[in-house]
Image: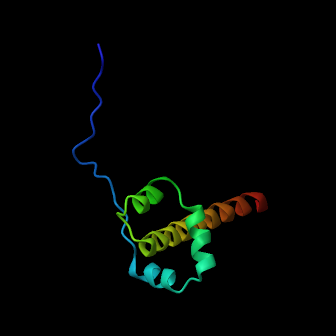
Amino acid sequence: MVAKIGIPKDSVMKIKVADPEYLEKARQLSKEDAERLFSRMRGRLMRRLEDKKLTPLDAIAIQLELEDEELKDWRARLGELRKKHKA
């Protein structure tokens, strides 16, 4: 017997939309900086760009936002580690 695994009705796949603040930051990037961001894009974001579901500007803006969120999380974890080592 094979068990059926379903997706809960209340779960919705979130599609990230570029924040206006990050769109403005993306517009101000040099071509070289934009290429660096493209090179760090992964998975779903790159596929959405390739499938033309996102403009290059939107993709860069979303990547900037994701990296800012990751940096914020990293700084929080580093702060916790520093507190533990001081104690």
Report the side of 44 relative to 84 (left or right). left
Question: How far across and down, in percent of the image, does residue 60 sit?
Answer: 49, 72
**Total numbered labels:** 0
Percent x, y for residue 8? 25, 41
Image quarter where the N terminus lies is top left
The image quadrant that residue 17 belongs to is bottom left
Q: Position of residue 80 (x, y in %)?
A: 66, 61
Farthest-out residue, right: 86
Q: Quadrant of the C terminus?
A: bottom right
Q: Nearer the viewer, residue 45 or 15?
A: 45
Q: Nearer the viewer, residue 49 or 11?
A: 49
Residue 32 picture location, percent across and down: 63, 77
Q: Report the residue that reaches farthest toward the left.
A: 9
27 to 72, vertically: above or below: below
Residue plotted at (71% across, 63% down):
83
The part of the image, by quadrant, that contains residue 56 is bottom left
**Left or right: 73 with respect to 78?**
left
Colouring method of the image: rainbow
Q: Taking 56 as reference, is 37 left or right?
A: right
Above or below 8: residue 29: below
- In front here: 73 or 28? 28
Give the residue at x 78% y 62%.
86
